[in-house]
Amino acid sequence: MTAAPEPENADEPRDPGPDATSGTTDWESYNNAYLAAALAWLRLLLREHIAAAAPDPARPTAADADGESPTVARRQMAELAADTAGATGAPPALIGLGRVLGLSLFEQHTLLLCAAPELDPGIADLYARAQGGPLAGHPTFALALSVLPDPVWDVLSPYRGLRYWRLLDIDRSTGRSLVTSPLRADERIVNHLKGLDHLDERLHALLTPLQQDARPFGSFFSVPHSAVEEILGHWPEPQPAADGRAPVIQLLGADRESKRSVAEQAASASGLLLYGMTAGAIPGPAEELDAVARLWHREARLAPLALYLDADDERGTGADVMGRTGEVGRFLERSGGPCFVATRETRPDVPAPTAAVEVTPPPAAERAAAWGSVFLPADADRLAGQFTLDLSVIHEVAAAGAGPEQAWHDCLVRTRPRLGSLAQRLESRVGWDDIVLPENDRALLRQIADQVAQRATVHDRWGFADRVSRGLGITALFTGPSGTGKTMAAEVLAGHLGLDLYRVDLSAAVSKYIGETEKNLRRLFDAAEPGGAILFFDEADALFGKRSEVKDSHDRYANIEVSYLLQQMESYRGLAILATNQRRALDTAFLRRLRFIVPFGFPASTERHAMWARAFPASAPVDPLDLERLAALPLSGGMIRNIALNAAFAAASAGTAISMRAVLAAARAELHKVGTPVPEQDLSWPPPTAAPSGVEV
């Protein structure tokens, strides 16, 4: 890669530009006066060139027409530039631009020549006269070389400032040579020369301004975040060195919110505006990638900006991943300015200079102390134990002035994981009264709920987490036939605990490409960690099956997947629920590491009676039902739910109440669907007076 052009006076500090004066009216007035003087000087040069090319004794010279010569005008420009810098602390935009982008004096004048038509449309007539004809009303390199003082040919080089920084657009559609092709100053640069600074519109679709409000650590908490102090040690000055290269800070760890907050705090302390971009937004084609990287590098030179590159969001499988490998490194190699890279682990493709900073969420005691400044100790411990939020985020939620329940809801929304196609969030609309289970199984569910609610007390306050390094995750296996209430039990736990429930899509998590299954699982657990969401693996035997004897590389890799999953389950801070219809299919080593195993058997008649009693909503029109007769049918809870719904639709279509006849008709269809034989006399209504011969469905 060709290095960016350097300022001629590299030992001078970088000029902050108009932003250093906050866009004051004084600087704008001085800058406008300088531009007016520069345009007047340019017009004098053009007229002098025209007069020299076609001398006419009757035509007045440039000096006679304006009462001054180009030399005098140039002296006035220098005086205005000195006055601007002396009065406002910043030079005119054109001079400041030349310093930060390493432009020679001739390159600055060439840029002025190209920007002049946007500042003074009438100057195009002089261009046409100077170049000979009405079709030559646009500036060219040839015009610059012939009109401007002290010309140098390297202005044409693509590695010099004007073309490297894309300050000019060259129209090659005319078929002319590079020297005679029309030139136009880039719109962003023209606005900068006017004193109007904004992010280049070509970057708007890729970058997002990150919020940096008044959330200093020290104003609300006792000490600043150690990671922020470490970053500031790597960035001793707010702006990078003359070569435009500040160390790339790799923010390591699984806590996305903390990494972003640390980046915001470090950027704010360095006087930088922070913009965020995901790694997936980096263009794939090399030419597009280079254009975006160079535009961002230019923006970082023009204004005090920093980039937050979120590499935690990298997606894709197999060929997509292999095809996109290295784009982050290529982008960073071609760009410049202060940059953060949020990543789970150190990336080898980040170019030097770089520094790795570990970012971990604050411990539970600090989170509890932060919540305790607003809420009662019990509420503070509950919030701190469930949500691993950064202290600045806790401050933001607490400052809203809501009660603990609203704060819980706000934290739940903030930590809601972005799992894409890996999992689906299930809304919990059931409670303990809606599920029918034997008392022993219900007690197990209660015990699971109690451990989730009290894990902060046991692990953190009582010190068990300090003595046990693994196995702190709460895991449960729900095993039993389909329709026996495994999913409903997970919904009951989520509703009781006030947590989100996600059903994991194993078909999306498991990949045929080596390493992709582990990557998906890690992303799943990392995303769910801050909020402690409940993860529900339905039909888990597809992924958590028995480890096979190693006969080939495929068997070895399948066993690695199972081992990796066991590690993730043990370290996950939330509740992970596995559901399977075939308990025997699960690896025994995996079963030993599960804290709870809850069997869901086929319901007995007394349990089916209770299910039928709760099958219909109170607002539904239901005729008296024979619950004893319905409870005698061999149905699971899921089948009862389907029958009740189908009977309701049949009654609504007929315009009647839900009757016993409609329920039995729906039961006949459900039993026929699953192939369960039942005597017809058990499904007829009204019941026969004499027992007829049995007819199987």
Image (cartoon, rainbow, N blue to C red):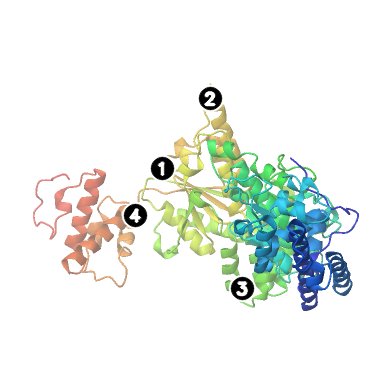
* Element on which disc 2 rests: loop
Q: Marks 3 and 2: CB-CB under 8 Å? A: no
**Dot 1: what SS?**
loop
Q: Earlier in the sequence, mark 4 or mark 1?
A: 1
Residue 296 in picture, x, y percent from top left: 69, 54
The crowding category of the residue bearing disc 3, from other C-alpha atoms within 10 Å (few below 14, some 14 to 19, many at least 20), is: some
Give how far across and how far down residue 45 sits, in percent. 78, 62
Q: In this view, does 544 lie to the left or right of 438?
A: right
- Which quadrant of the structure image shows residue 558? top right
* Three-letter amino acid code of the residue under disc 1: Asn
Residue denoted by label 3: 404
Distance from the alpha carbon under mark 3 to that under mark 2: 52 Å
For mark 4, give the secondary structure.
Answer: helix
For label 1, the residue is 581
Q: Give how far across and how far down residue 689 sits, in percent.
A: 9, 57
Q: Image point 56% across, 33% down: which residue?
A: 514
Most foreground residue, 612 or 33: 33
Q: Is 286 drawn above or below residue 240 in the view shown?
A: above
Q: Quadrant of residue 48?
A: bottom right
Q: Name the residue under label 4.
A: 637
Quadrant in the picture for the N terminus: top right
- The answer to whether residue 382 is left or right of residue 435 is right
Mark 4 or mark 2, earlier in chain: 2
Which dot marks residue 549?
2
- Badge 4 vs badge 2, beta-carbon distance below 8 Å: no
Q: Are dots 3 and 4 in contact, CB under 8 Å?
A: no
Q: Of the two numbered discs 3 and 2 on the same chain, state the one appearing first in sequence.
A: 3
